[in-house]
Amino acid sequence: MKKSTLIVMAVVVVLFLLSWVLKASALQPEQGSYILRGFLVTFAAFLTLAVMSFLYQDNPFYKFAEHLFVGVSAAFWMCMGFWTTIVQNLIPRLSTSLADYFMVPQRPEGLNLFFYTPVILGILLLMRLSPRGGWISRWPLAFIVGTTAGLNFIRYLRSDFIKQISSTFVPLLGTQWEGIGPFLSNLDLSASGQLVLLLSNWVVFLGVFTGLIYFFFSKEHKGAFGVGSRVGIWILMITFGASFGYTVMGRISLLVGRITFLFGTWLELI
Amino acid sequence: MFKRRIPLFILAFVGTLLIVSVFIPPMENLGEDFTLFFDIIAVFAFFLGGGNLVRIHFGKLRRRKKDWGFSIVTLVAFFFMLTIGLLKVSSVGGVWNIPLLGIGDPAAIAASPTTEGSWFQETFNYVINPLQSTMYALLAFFVASASYRAFRAKNREATLLLLAAFIILLGRTPFGMELTRWVPESFSVLQIPNMAIWIMNSPNLAGQRAILIGIGLGVVSMSLRLILGIERSYLGEDRG
């Protein structure tokens, strides 16, 4: 390891210890276990800065944070799965004594030995770690893929296909059409006005239609079909722009949250 | 036979059964049971992932591969979190509870692992949460540099993308609201926040819907390919 890296590491360790002491002493009057609390806040700040240091370049602090994240997250999901699915949903269906041990309520319908099937399939899945018997993990994998295929076949047909199409057929003259006279007498551009609502219905109907034309590749995009396809691209571009803007906002609000933590909870400057 | 035909049969049987169950009232709950089966097997998949992680990092450590020191961090973090999570270690007001080892209050075994005061929850609050949100927040910087390249209004399509994103971004800030506050109520759709709402509810909705219909058709056709045994890539390359 380079000498300069060692110096930087030493400085970071000293700053960490200093921050821990200061934080703990600041918390002392308010909370019990202030030494632990001071450590946790300092460690969270260190991890935040370690991840942000990647903006400069890849470095040992970022790698530390990255490896820590991998280890902790893997164990987190394993524990959550164990306590929420195995203990809460599986054990009460398989064993009364184990349910009593874990203090989970018994199922009103009693035991269901049918639930040994996922346990057996789960154990077969773990065989993937074995070099010789790894092929047997294809059975539970087939079950997982089969369940996904069977459930999604109906679910997507209902929610992503039929429901989306039926929602597209909106009244193109508005829901409160009272004739051309009343319509022309009220043509303001207020956000809840009839003209804007009418325009929205037209945009949704034509937008979905032209968007689908763009995705139809069995016919060359020429002539009237080409015009529809081009309008479809415009609608899709607006969609991508809106999604992009929305995502950026989400990320920025997370960044604001981290900066608030650093300057508020950790440094107590704001 | 065992390596290839049985998985194909299991998939076809389970997939068909779940589709048929929708049309037969006594079998309606089958979908719920199978979803639970799926969740239970998924937990075993988490264990498989954890086991694989340990295997890879122990291997890296044993062979002293590049950055092997960081593998120690991963392994220590993994076993620490696993221990406190599975044993439900907690200490509230200086009183220790490790119910699975018979230490402290035995009733603590019934508490949720994410109860305030449990070490598991504290580790989530002070390690996972900061790391996760900073990782995502970091993307704001990369998105900024990516948007500089993407948002140059080179043609009509790029201009539309730029305008939509700009209005959405501006419409959700107080600055956007102040900028067009002078617009009269009878033209309120031209106020930037209202424009952002209109874009989200009209052209964006239309585009999302066209994409969703495409996804729906794609998922249905892929499900059929799997159930009929046409799509076999999930079996891997070993054709034994």
Image (spheres, helix red, strand yellow):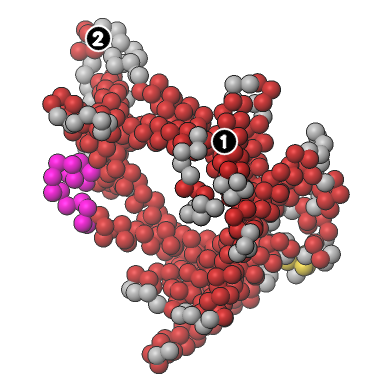
Q: Quadrant of residue B80?
A: bottom right
Furthest-right residue in view?
A: A97
Whether residue B55 is visible, yes or no, is yes
Q: Quadrant of residue A238?
A: top left
Whether residue B177 is visible, yes or no, is no
Residue B161 locus on image (x, y percent): 23, 44
Image: magenta residue range = B148-162
Q: Circle 2 is placed at which residue position? A: A182
Depth check: give the residue in front, A203 or A195.
A203
A121 left or right, relative to B171: right
Q: Height in image: B173 above or below A18?
A: above
- The type of residue carrying mark 2 is Pro
- Residue drawn at (56%, 47%) of the image: B4
- Residue drawn at (63%, 73%) of the image: A36
A56 left or right, relative to B133: left
Depth check: give the residue in front, B165 or A204.
A204
Q: Circle 1 is placed at which residue position? A: B12
Residue A183, magenta (yes or no): no
Task: Return the chain for callout 1.
Answer: B
- The type of residue carrying mark 1 is Ala
Residue A97 locus on image (x, y percent): 86, 49
Secondary structure mostly taken by the magenta-highlighted segment of the chain: helix
Depth check: give the residue in front, A188 or B125.
B125
Q: Residues within 10 Å of mark 1 (few under 14, many from 20)?
A: many
User: SS of the residue at dot 2?
Assistant: helix
Q: Quadrant of the C terminus of chain A?
A: bottom left
Residue B77 locus on image (x, y percent): 59, 71
